[in-house]
Image: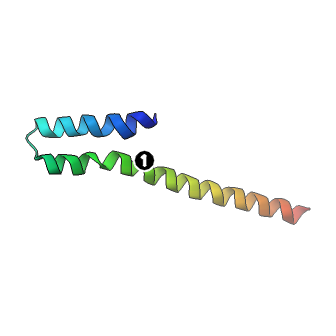
Amino acid sequence: MIAAFDLGGPLITYALLRSAGMSTVAALVISGIFPALGALGLAVWTLAYGEHEKRKAERLAASA
């Protein structure tokens, strides 16, 4: 799954944009969006999961 987003997504996007006539720089910048979105999604999930576990631990400590 990670390989698809971090490798496949940018390579396919770059190839499609270049074949459509876009400049190399623009195609590289736009193709970098896929790994950035993956990293952002992972960061958001990690923060949300951490908050969930923190609340769960607080509830457990309060009930003890």
Residue 49 shown left or right of residue 19 in the figure? right
- Identified at 57% across, 54% down, the residue is 46
Residue 31 shown left or right of residue 40 in the figure? left
- Identified at 35% across, 36% down, the residue is 7
- Identified at 7% across, 41% down, the residue is 21
Identify whether 3 is placed above or below 54: above
In the rendered image, which quarter is residue 63 located in? bottom right
Residue 22 shown left or right of residue 1 in the figure? left
> In the displayed image of the protein, which residue is found farthest to the left?
21
x and y, in percent, of residue 18 in the image:
13, 39
Mark 1 residue element: helix
Which quadrant is home to the C terminus? bottom right
> Mark 1 sits on what residue?
38
- Identified at 25% across, 34% down, the residue is 12
x and y, in percent, of residue 50 in the image:
64, 57
x and y, in percent, of residue 47 in the image:
57, 58
> In the displayed image of the protein, which residue is found farthest to the right?
64
Task: Give the class, few, some or many, for how many residues have Cα within 10 Å of label 1's Cα (few <14, many ≥20).
Answer: some
Q: Closest to the observer: 25 or 48?
A: 25
Number of marks in picture: 1
Identify whether 2 is placed above or below 29: above
Q: Amino acid at mark 1?
A: Gly
x and y, in percent, of residue 6 in the image:
38, 40
